Amino acid sequence: MTSRPSFDIVLAGRGGQGVIFLSRVIGEAAMLQGLGVRTTETHGMAMRGGSVLCFVRIGDVLGPLFPRGSASVLMALHPDEALSGSIYLKSAGVMVINTSKLPEQIKYPANSKIITVDAESLAGNEGVPRSFNLALLGAAAVLDGFPIESEGLESVISSKGPKDVRERNLRIFRLGGERSEKAVIQVRSERGERSH
């Protein structure tokens, strides 16, 4: 019996942005779908505002860590943290960044796709600014090849948080998916040249 290769995701952000929460939502949804999943995180002293990286592996894997250049998706909850996460993204991978403009200091992997989502504005407009991370997850969930079905993610999201915000959290997740299709930038070369 041969196993399928894993689908690797790196989540990059800062303490207090819900990076670890997002990895748990992904993990629970993967398990609901019967997929194997492993997660781990590294963080700067676990302090609010410190850098946090979470690694999520979906598939038949023994451990949660993966080498640089192997992640299919990077979700950057803070645009400045996209730089630290970008080293894990493979060529032709997808970066989903919480920003309205791209950080210039990032060396984008060749043939990668970049999706920008102004997630904080989306969540703020729904009255739940702390749930902006769900907009990024929504943007990633509609990608071709993303292994977790949106229905499973929505099931987990609707079970989290106070009852009065659950429906708004689902709207934020769905809006992230809708907006991602309108904000795609393609990186064409090893030097990181971009085209819209």
Image: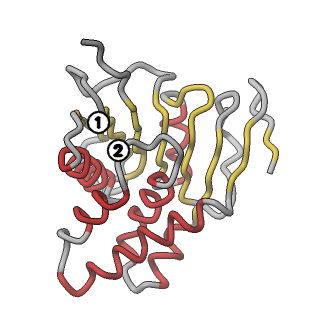
Dot 2: what SS? Answer: strand
- Residue in the image at 59% along x and 67% along y: 179
Question: With 129 as the anchor, is 158 left or right in this view?
Answer: left
* Residue identified by numbered label 1: 42
- Residue in the image at 36% along x and 70% along y: 131
Mark 1 Cα shell of 10 Å, populated few (<14), some (14-19), many (≥20): few
Q: Position of residue 98 (x, y in %)?
A: 54, 59
* Residue identified by numbered label 2: 52
Judge whether 39 appears above or below 80 on screen. above
For residue 104, which quarter of the picture?
top right
Callout 2 amino acid: Val
Q: Position of residue 47 (x, y in %)?
A: 27, 51
Callout 1 amino acid: Thr
Question: With 155 as the anchor, is 52 left or right in this view?
Answer: right
Question: Are dots 1 and 2 in contact, CB under 8 Å?
Answer: yes
Dot 1: what SS? Answer: strand
